[in-house]
Image: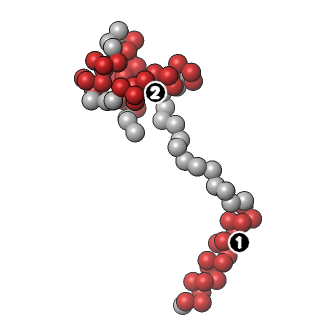
Amino acid sequence: MISKELRELIITDRREGLSVAEIGRVLHVGKPTIWKLLKQERETGSIESRCHGRKSSLTAEQYEQMIATLNKGTQAIV
């Protein structure tokens, strides 16, 4: 993951006419990373880092059951 400041520099440099290769060389960022950021900015208008998390496969009820089961297990150990 690259910092917001670095993302802003990449976008600014590209708008000023620098090539992707030049930007990568100067800022020490891989060309695929630069291309992905440029595509994201073009498609969404944002350069914010995208969440790479995954949605839980448990329902709220399943989660509560799991917590209750874990709590019973720790009480049995004590």
Tell me the quarter of the image containing the N terminus.
Answer: top left
Amino acid residing under circle 2: Lys
**Whether residue 41 is situated above or below residue 65 in the rendered picture:** above
> x and y percent of residue 20 in the render?
35, 18
CA gap between label 2 and label 1 equals: 41 Å
Front disc: 2 or 1 = 2
Please give the name of the residue rendered at 64% of the width and 83% of the height, measured from the top-left corner.
72
Q: Which residue is mark 1?
A: 65
> x and y percent of residue 60 in the render?
72, 61
Query: Toward which corner of the image does residue 70 lie, by quadrant?
Result: bottom right
**Whether residue 42 is situated above or below residue 62 in the rendered picture:** above
Task: Assign a secondary structure to mark 1.
Answer: helix
> x and y percent of residue 59 in the render?
72, 59
Q: Looking at the image, is mark 2 or mark 1 earlier in the sequence?
A: 2
Task: Assign a secondary structure to mark 2.
Answer: helix
Q: Which residue is mark 2?
A: 36
> x and y percent of residue 65 in the render?
71, 72
Q: For the view shown, which residue lies furthest in the right direction?
A: 61
> Can residue 24 be seen in the rendering of this structure?
yes
Neighbourhood count class around disc 1 (C-alpha, 10 Å): few under 14, some 14–19, many 20 upward: few
Amino acid residing under circle 1: Gln
Camera-side residue of 47 and 57: 57
**Whether residue 46 is situated above or below residue 13 in the rendered picture:** below
- Quick check: 58 left or right of 15? right
Please give the name of the residue rendered at 66% of the width and 78% of the height, measured from the top-left corner.
69
Q: How is the image coloured?
A: secondary structure
Please give the name of the residue rendered at 33% of the width and 14% of the height, measured from the top-left corner.
19
- Quick check: 63 left or right of 41? right
User: Which label was assigned to residue 13?
Assistant: none
Tell me the quarter of the image containing the C terminus.
Answer: bottom right
Q: For the view shown, which residue lies furthest in the top direction?
A: 17
